[in-house]
Image (cartoon, rainbow, N blue to C red):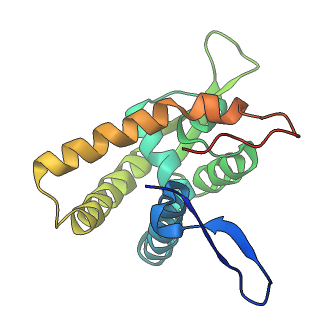
Amino acid sequence: MASTKRRKANGVDGDREVLDLTGYVPYFLTAISNTWSRSSSRLYLERFGVGVTEWRIISQLAIEPRIGAQRICEIIGLDKGAVSRGVAALVAAGHVGESADGRDARRQVLELTPDGYALHDRLIALAIERERLVLADFTQEEVDRLLALLRRIHARLPELREFAPAPDKPAKRR
């Protein structure tokens, strides 16, 4: 499916190539991600006093305890500032503890506290419920296929971060 189409732009003479959002993958990924994140953040703030950024930090620390903030940034793909603010809020609330790394005293490692694990358990139940709601119309085979496709896209992200075509050459179209 082509991600552009030729059409007469509103108020402009002549045809112009414009995005066809119905076939533009980044549009769908962004719209889904933004809506899911905003609605999650609102719900988690109302129920648990943490936003989606803090939930992502909590979930990563449950998966991989005693890691540094930089590792969280690498895995989740958030910028250092957002992770730093989220960690500070979680430490202040008593959900995360900080300690010196046994291998490098200059480096701090993060770990969920017992309160943090209790919060994690409440949050994960709601997060999974929301995932089920979004995927309710899919068969298990379709979910497996969707995950396989998303993993393939995810595997290309390092190339996307480095992608910079020459300024005078447009990127190739599909």
Residue 158: where, in percent of width, then height?
61, 29
Q: What count of labels does the image hold?
A: 0
Q: Residue furthest right?
A: 168
Q: Is residue 126 left or right of 91 when viewed as pictured?
A: left
Residue reaching furthest top? 103
- Pinpoint residue 160: horizontal percent, then vertical percent: 63, 35
* Relative height, residue 4 to residue 117 (above, below): below
Judge whether residue 69 can be spotted in this image.
Answer: no
Of residues 7 and 112, the one nearer the viewer is 7
Give the image quarter of residue 19: bottom right
Which residue is at the far bottom? Answer: 11
Residue shown at 32%/60% (left/top)? 127
Q: Residue at x 44, y 67 (%)?
A: 36
Q: Would residue 167 be found to the left or right of residue 52 on screen?
A: right
Using the rendered image of the protein, determine whether residue 153 is visible from the camera's viewpoint: yes
Name the quadrant of the C terminus.
top right
Which residue shows up at 58% across the image and 53% down it? 90
Residue 133 or residue 111, whichever sits in front: 133
Query: As displayed, is residue 90 above or below residue 27?
Result: above
The x, y position of residue 27, in whole percent, is: 54, 63
Given residues 32 and 56, the one toward you in this image is: 32
Quadrant location of the N terminus?
bottom left
Q: Residue at x 70, y 45 (%)?
A: 79
